[in-house]
């Protein structure tokens, strides 16, 4: 019997056939529980025929020196038939409770009976993950073992554990190199690397797959994703060569493949500055795009429209893209929409974008654009009720544009004095801005002293990097390049 098949009824709450785990000889009505120590580990022998499930489990718990919890989950009068010889405790519980459609949780001093029907989706994923791991460890040479490894990766992905998922896919490739699932494992590991921004690793995985013996089924997808990785690494021209060769050798097989290729090619055209060609590529396939393709095309269209000098149209494309984006992608899209609307002198559109972003739960990143739009429209920019992030963004924009230093000081001084209540990154930004103010006033010495005094109180690496870069840029602006190099390394030396 395939050992992995045991997981299906176990996870679905089904009941395996008693014939699969019992025989006709040596079975008794009253349960028999025996324990033997082998290599310092207890092994259990359990024999029972049509015995009370509660009695069997109580005896198992007693033999294992554990308390039996939640016995009420058992159906009244439930019977079990078990014939297991020298098995570890977890296998004994899996077989016994699995035959009743139940699960268990093994604690240090307890055995808790669980009904899968009462578990949340997240808990069911945990149960499935543990079951696959157990099965894979017990039967590493079973033909279904690669499928178990793939399933572990899928579960980790669904739980958002991307690095763990990739590790499972890579271990499948290493441990079962001849499995037909190797191609799928390469694709999934490569896509995870791409989603994490690790484009070099993604390119390596897709390149290996495209050049391997197992690549026939995945050859087109592997080369297409390899091209996408090239674009992200700054080699868009090579990506175009690959895509053109792919189109000659392997024409698109269906609408999905065609959509994916056109999107990657349009991205490559954007990256090489051929914005009109990118728009044409999208427009040629617009009627054939599926819903996802049409949405992804919006960001490519936005980049192209900005490239040909239409910031207002680009802003609208980013705003449409933001409506269905999630997480960092959505925040980025709203920021781009606000930036481009301001560049198009459409101040009302900036305020609209800021409101939409706020409704979407994105409350930072657009403050400077909104403040500038309000200023241009003659509206009040209230720095007393604005958040520290909003006030800081306003001051940073004033500094960037050589604005009113008096107004900068009015905003920054209270923030600097209260910086101890801010998070590390905001604290570092406040200190850098305050140092820039003193530098703009002609006092580089005080500017560097502010940053030097701030660094010991910063804990996060990202915030320390913010300080280091801030100090180095001040020094570079004055031509002190050796001191700037030291600042990048965390040492602020007065010139």
Image (spheres, rainbow, N blue to C red):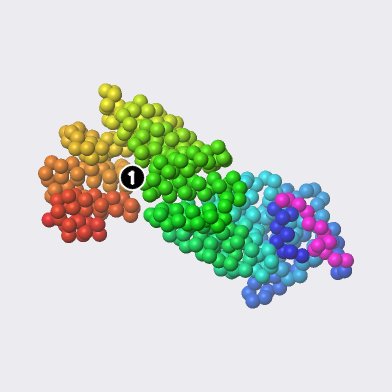
- Residue pictured at 55% horizontal, 66% vertical: 212
The answer to whether residue 487 is left or right of residue 229 is left
The answer to whether residue 180 is left or right of residue 403 is right
Is the residue 287 above or below the residue 451 in the image?
A: above
Tag count: 1
Q: Secondary structure at mark 1?
A: loop
Pick whichever, 346 or 491, lies toward us.
Answer: 346
- Residue pictured at 84% horizontal, 61% vertical: 19
The answer to whether residue 16 is left or right of residue 178 is right
On the question of residue 290 being in view, the answer is yes
Q: Which image quarter: residue 276?
A: top left
Is the residue 474 above or below the residue 7 in the image?
A: above
Pick whichever, 71 or 101, lies toward us.
Answer: 101
In the rendered image, residue 432 lying in the magenta stretch gets the answer: no
On the question of residue 192 being in view, the answer is no
Q: Which residue is mark 1?
A: 423
Q: Position of residue 106 (x, y in %)?
A: 64, 58
Magenta residue span: 12-24
Q: Which image quarter: residue 63?
A: bottom right
- Residue pictured at 53% horizontal, 65% vertical: 211
Q: Position of residue 427 (x, y in %)?
A: 29, 45
In the rendered image, residue 23 lying in the magenta stretch gets the answer: yes
Q: Magenta stretch: dominant SS? A: loop
Q: Position of residue 74 (x, y in %)?
A: 75, 50
């Amino acid at each position: 019997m395939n050992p992995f098949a045991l997981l299906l009824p176990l996870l679905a709450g089904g009941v395996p056939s008693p014939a699969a785990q019992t025989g006709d000889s040596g079975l008794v009505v009253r349960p028999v529980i025996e324990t033997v120590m082998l290599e310092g580990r207890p092994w259990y022998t359990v024999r029972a025929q049509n015995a009370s499930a509660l009695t069997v489990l109580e005896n198992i718990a007693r033999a294992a020196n554990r308390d039996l919890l939640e016995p009420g989950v058992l159906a009244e009068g439930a019977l079990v038939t078990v014939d297991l010889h020298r098995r570890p405790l977890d296998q004994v519980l899996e077989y016994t409770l699995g035959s009743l459609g139940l699960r268990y949780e093994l604690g240090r001093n307890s055995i808790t009976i669980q009904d899968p029907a009462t578990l949340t989706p997240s808990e069911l994923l945990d149960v499935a993950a543990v079951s696959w791991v157990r099965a894979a460890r017990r039967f590493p040479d079973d033909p279904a073992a690669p499928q178990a490894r793939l399933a572990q990766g899928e579960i980790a992905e669904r739980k958002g554990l991307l690095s763990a998922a990739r590790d499972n896919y890579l271990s499948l490739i290493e441990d079962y190199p001849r499995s037909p699932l190797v191609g799928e494992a390469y694709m999934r590991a490569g896509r995870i690397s791409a989603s994490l921004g690790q484009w070099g690793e993604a390119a390596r995985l897709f390149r290996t797959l495209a050049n391997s013996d197992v690549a026939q089924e995945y050859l087109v997808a592997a080369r297409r994703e390899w091209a996408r990785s090239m674009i992200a690494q700054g080699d868009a021209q090579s990506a175009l060569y690959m895509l053109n060769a792919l189109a000659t050798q392997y024409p698109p097989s269906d609408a999905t493949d065609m959509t994916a290729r056109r999107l990657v090619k349009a991205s490559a055209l954007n990256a090489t500055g051929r914005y009109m060609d990118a728009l044409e590529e999208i427009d040629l396939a617009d009627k054939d795009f599926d819903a996802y393709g049409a949405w992804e095309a919006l960001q490519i269209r936005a980049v192209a429209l900005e490239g040909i000098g239409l910031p207002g149209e680009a802003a609208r494309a980013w705003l449409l893209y933001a409506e269905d984006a999630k997480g960092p992608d959505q925040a980025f899209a709203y920021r781009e929409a606000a930036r481009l609307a301001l560049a198009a002198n459409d101040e009302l559109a900036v305020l609209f974008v800021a409101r939409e972003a706020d409704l979407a739960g994105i409350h930072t990143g657009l403050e400077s654009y909104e403040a500038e739009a309000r200023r241009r429209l003659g509206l009040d920019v209230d720095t007393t009720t604005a958040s520290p992030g909003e006030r800081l963004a306003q001051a940073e924009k004033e500094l960037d544009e050589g604005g009113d230093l008096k107004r900068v000081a009015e905003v920054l001084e209270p923030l600097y004095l209260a910086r101890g209540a801010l998070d590390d990154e905001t604290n570092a930004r406040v200190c850098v801005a305050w140092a820039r103010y003193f530098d703009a006033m002609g006092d580089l010495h005080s500017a560097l002293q502010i940053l030097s005094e701030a660094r010991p109180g910063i804990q996060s690496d990202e915030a320390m990097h913010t300080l280091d870069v801030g100090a180095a840029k001040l020094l570079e602006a004055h031509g002190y390049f050796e001191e700037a190099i030291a600042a990048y390394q965390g040492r602020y030396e007065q010139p």
